[in-house]
Amino acid sequence: MPAERGRPPLTERRRQATRIEIAETAAALFADRGYEATTVEDIAAAAGVSLRTFYRYCSSKEDALTPLVTSGVGQLVDALAAQPADEPLTAAVDRVFATPMSERRLAEAEPGRALVRLMGSVPALRSHWLAAVQELRDRLLPVLAARTGRPADSLEVRLLAGALLDAVTAAAEHWAARDEPEDLLALTHRAMAFLRLDQL
């Protein structure tokens, strides 16, 4: 049976599932034992893969978490691209957050909060968090270009992409840091309103 149009081939979906499994295992071990005390061997054994397989998917133990960041925020970018281009940006973001996504890791309460805290508190992981957000910013440029009617490389679109991702990531970090957090969508609204993105 041919692959569903627009859907990655089965082999790639299996690879992505393996990446996510390794990443979730690493996140759980880092949270339980601490980043420094967890080795690549620990992650591979807990994930049920060989060291060779681990290094096929990850260059280092800090790189193991990257799929969780990109699958969470990346799906927001993909879902935003699917919204009507003439819809206000805040309404489009509302619709994205209201739509269930099986892979939206940052929206899963306790595991998501633990992941964001971990990425923000360990310098080696923080650099990967920032690199992943930068990569997603580049993916967001054509999406916002279509919504604004401006070139993807224009100053305005670059500023808008940076502001939107800053609003989302700042809201996630604030959400993760609180013992009794507000709703993540409500915090995202606050961040977007403060930056006046709610008028776009």
Image (tube, rainbow, N blue to C red):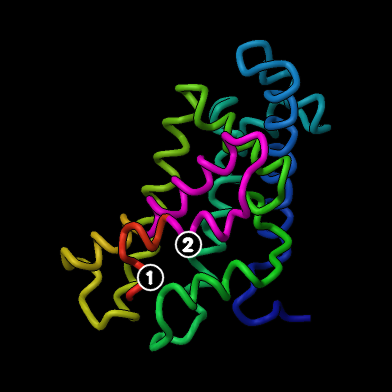
Residue 174 belongs to magenta span: yes
Query: Of 99 and 182, which appears nearest the observer?
Result: 182
* Rendering quarter of residue 127: top left
Which quarter of the image is occupied by the C terminus? Answer: bottom left
Which secondary structure lies at badge 1?
helix
What is the number of the mark on residue 198? 1
As drawn, is 142 to the left or to the right of 39? left
Does residue 73 lie above or below 99 as drawn? above
Which secondary structure lies at badge 2?
helix
What's under tag 1, amino acid-wise?
Asp
- From the top left corner, tell me how far across and down residue 177 is, in percent: 57, 34
The furthest residue to the left = 155
For label 2, the residue is 189
- From the top left corner, tell me how far across and down residue 95 is, in percent: 57, 75
Does residue 153 lie above or below 149 as drawn? above
As drawn, is 16 to the left or to the right of 123? right
